[in-house]
Amino acid sequence: MITNILIIDDQPEMLELMTDVLTPEGFNVTALLYTDDIAQSISIYQPDIVLLDHLLAGVNGGELCREIKNHPLTASLPVILLSGYPRLLEAFGDYGCDAFIPKPFDLDEMIGAIKRCLGESHYEHA
């Protein structure tokens, strides 16, 4: 079973880097610069996990995370928030995310967080 990852980050270089690192690890990566409807994006791409930048152009990734976690059909979907401003979460809370990774991050740390959020048994079948 292939694991689908949806990444939303408004920095093309970050999307390219994460795609280049995660694809050889066996993940199927969908990288978006923007979404105006997170529920629709999840419905279309069917991710097993979502990686969201906290500060996106025109939208708060934390609010997208909260929307995912508050919807009955997506509440169990793991979400990892990424941010270059880790103190934002101290001020505003974690939005219900399953993990938080401050930027810049170690690529092995990111892969480890993804595996932990998915659960090792899920990853072993990927």
Image: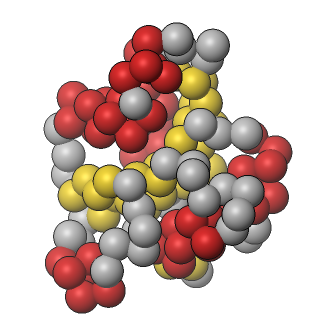
Colouring: secondary structure
**Residue 90 seen in the current view:** yes
Q: Please determine whether, in this image, residue 116 is positioned above or below residue 77.
A: above
**Residue 20 seen in the current view:** no
Left or right? Give the position of 84 relative to 71: left
Q: Residue at x 32, y 35 (%)?
A: 116
Is 74 or 5 nearer to us in this picture? 74
Q: Residue at x 52, y 11 (%)?
A: 125
Is 23 or 1 nearer to us in this picture? 1
Left or right? Give the position of 59 relative to 74: left
Left or right? Give the position of 41 relative to 74: right
Residue 126 position, x and y percent, is 53, 14
Q: Please determine whether, in this image, residue 14 is positioned above or below residue 98.
A: above
Image quadrant in which you'd find residue 58: bottom right
Is 66 or 51 nearer to us in this picture? 66
Left or right? Give the position of 125 relative to 89: right
Residue 112 position, x and y percent, is 26, 31
